[in-house]
Image (cartoon, rainbow, N blue to C red):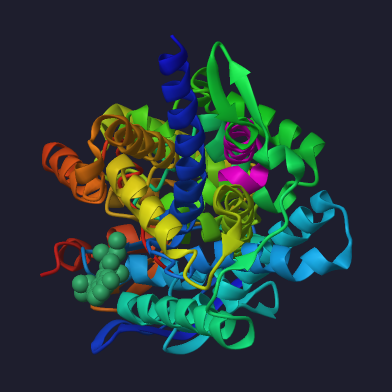
């Protein structure tokens, strides 16, 4: 469904991603693991069209999106939740969600239906719909950016560290929600530092280190890899 | 009482014009973090369109619509000529191109029209006066107040209630994130330039309506006023621009009323001193806009 082949990303002389290749099959949840600075976010941003690839290709359902703009990528059915948890702070929760449905703005009935489904998944957001997004707690903001991404009705969702900096109880809820999304058939690429929880929900996983994929396999295989923590701690 | 009414009408009509000028500038600044130096020339374009159309025998209102239309066209043209080609380059590059475009338009007016003032057609109603509670005031002041209330409300509605406006506000705080939701960057930027041109066009008609003539440099004062008002109000905030415009008008009008003839020559010096005091007190402006933001 999503094919990444020999993808490289550079910031000037810094080579953040060095020729990585992987595939996401429809309905799969794949975890992308790795220490800070491994190049995970650069990979995500590049797939999302927010960063130019310096080499390689990205193919979504047979269509090349390597040099597509962020707008074109979301139109192609791939939504991204960046690690920076970018709510529009001055806009209300409802306005944030409405922008998530920008590409479907001519289909208000479909958006309402989708919103109702999401309200069931994120009841806290429904309660706060007329509140400025900047006044939400960190966990609620994370829920909002995920819900907003889902308003575009994607077939693939990229999640960059959704549990970062959140209290354990909220992390728990986020992982439950990710499992629900997976059960609904959504294809998900999940970047995480919470290795155990990420592997618990994932079908397969990759480990990145210094811009390269250093391990890959099913969640069980990765879990049993003895040097996982070494990769993880950047050792 | 008459004096108080006179004062209020003067502040509101000047403030309304200032607020519209500031709004047109801050809409571009909010999204691109760039001051559009060619903004004043959009006002000039509206003025010369009125002048060029004056011989046509068209009804005044048609000429006015034409003038606003041309200001919109030149607003969008500013995007294509001065901003889009260099947007990805440095901030300095874009400042220079917008400055160059401003100069180009002014010089074109000097060369092809005239350095001397040209009369613009004004409807009779602009030169009539009315008496309200004993205060005599030109009708155009009331028209300016009405037009600014309508436009400020219209812009507020656009920005708060329409998808385009909400997308523009989102793009102003986090351009990349807005694009990742499918909001088309170029369309949003062009819409902002069109809206800016629209406001400049209306301001042009109201502003030039006070003077009755248009010269190539007519846009300089509105640009300066808009810039000062947005700095006072907070560069990134739309309500701030409006508040800044009215505050600047309050300062100017108060000085007009209180300074003696000798001192009135130095009115701008007094105004700027007050502006500096305001900025010393509130360096970010009165109303803080969205905290984050970036350019493309
Ligand atoms: N905007 C940037 N400019 C320069 N270097 C960057 C930038 N963003 C990330 N990097 C560098 O790229 C590498 C990978 O970063 P990133 O993709 O954010 O890793 P991760 O998400 O795995 O923590 C790091 O060495 C980081 O310092
Ligand atoms: Mg990261």
Nearer the observer, B199 or A235: B199
A105 to the left or right of A187: right
Query: Would you say the magenta stretch is mainly helix, strand or loop?
Result: helix
- Where is residue A16? Give x, y as percent: 29, 79
Nearer the observer, B245 or B258: B258
Which residue is at 36% across, 71% downward? A42
In the image, is residue A230 above or below residue B208?
below
- Where is residue B268? Give x, y as percent: 25, 50
Q: Which quarter of the figure has residue B95?
A: bottom left
Which residue is at 25% across, 41% downward? B261
Where, quadrant-wise, is the C terminus of chain B in this rendering? bottom left
Nearer the observer, A178 or B287: B287
Q: Magenta stretch: residue B149 in it?
A: yes
In the image, is residue A59 above or below residue B1?
below
Residue A76 in sight here = no
Q: Magenta stretch: residue B35 in it?
A: no
A157 to the left or right of A85: right
Which residue is at 78% across, 64% downward? B54
Where, quadrant-wise, is the N terminus of chain B in this rendering? top left
- Where is residue B172? Give x, y as percent: 45, 53
In the image, is residue B48 above or below residue B239?
below
A108 to the left or right of B194: right
Task: Tell me the magenta residue range.
Answer: B143-166
For ligand 2, the image quadrant comes to bottom left
Outermost residue, front direction?
B261
B257 to the left or right of A62: left
- Where is residue B161? Give x, y as percent: 64, 34
């Amino acid at each position: 469904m999503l094919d990444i082949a020999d993808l490289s990303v550079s910031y000037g002389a810094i080579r953040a991603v060095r020729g990585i290749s992987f595939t996401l099959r429809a309905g799969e949840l794949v975890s992308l693991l790795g220490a800070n600075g491994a190049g995970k976010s650069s990979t995500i941003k590049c797939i999302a069209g927010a960063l130019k690839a310096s080499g390689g290709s990205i193919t979504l359902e047979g269509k090349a999106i390597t040099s597509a703009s962020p707008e074109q990528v979301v139109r192609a059915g791939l939504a991204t939740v960046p690690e920076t948890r970018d709510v529009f702070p001055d806009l209300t929760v409802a306005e944030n969600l409405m922008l998530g449905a920008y590409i479907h703005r001519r289909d208000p009935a479909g958006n309402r239906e989708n919103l109702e489904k999401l309200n069931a998944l994120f009841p806290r957001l429904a309660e706060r719909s007329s509140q400025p997004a900047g006044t939400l707690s960190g966990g609620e903001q994370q829920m909002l950016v995920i819900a907003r991404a889902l308003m575009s009705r994607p077939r693939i969702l990229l999640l960059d560290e959704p549990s970062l900096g959140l209290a354990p109880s909220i992390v728990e809820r986020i992982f439950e929600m990710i499992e629900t999304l997976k059960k609904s058939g959504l294809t998900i690429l999940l970047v995480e530092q919470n290795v155990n929880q990420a592997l618990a929900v994932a079908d397969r996983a990759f480990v990145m280190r210094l811009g390269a994929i250093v391990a890959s396999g099913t969640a069980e295989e990765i879990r049993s890899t003895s040097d996982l923590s070494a990769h993880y701690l950047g050792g | 009482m008459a004096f108080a009414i006179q004062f209020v009408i003067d502040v509101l009509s000047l403030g309304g014009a200032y607020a519209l000028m500031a709004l047109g500038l801050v809409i571009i600044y909010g999204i691109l973090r760039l001051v559009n130096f060619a903004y004043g020339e959009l006002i000039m374009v509206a003025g010369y369109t009125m002048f060029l159309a004056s011989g046509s025998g068209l009804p005044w209102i048609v000429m006015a619509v034409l003038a606003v239309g041309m200001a919109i066209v030149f607003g969008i043209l500013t995007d294509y000529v001065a901003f889009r080609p260099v947007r990805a380059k440095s901030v300095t590059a874009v400042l220079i191109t917008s400055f160059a475009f401003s100069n180009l338009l002014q010089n074109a007016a000097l060369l092809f029209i005239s350095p001397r003032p040209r009369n613009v057609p004004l409807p009779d109603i602009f030169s009539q006066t009315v008496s309200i509670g004993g205060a005599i005031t030109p009708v155009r002041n009331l028209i300016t107040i009405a037009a600014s209330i309508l436009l400020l409300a219209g812009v507020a509605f656009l920005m708060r209630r329409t998808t385009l406006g909400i997308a523009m506000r989102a793009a102003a705080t986090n351009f990349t994130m807005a694009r990742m939701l499918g909001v088309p960057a170029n369309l949003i930027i062009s819409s902002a330039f069109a809206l800016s041109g629209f406001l400049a066009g209306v301001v042009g008609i109201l502003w030039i309506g006070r003077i009755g003539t248009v010269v190539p440099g007519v846009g300089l004062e509105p640009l300066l006023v808009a810039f000062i008002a947005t700095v006072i109000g907070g560069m990134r905030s739309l309500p701030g621009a409006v508040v800044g415009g009215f505050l600047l008008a309050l300062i100017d009008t108060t000085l007009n009323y209180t300074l003696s003839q000798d001192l009135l020559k130095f009115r701008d010096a007094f105004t700027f001193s007050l502006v500096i005091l305001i900025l010393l007190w509130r360096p970010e402006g009165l109303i803080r806009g969205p905290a984050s933001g970036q350019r493309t």
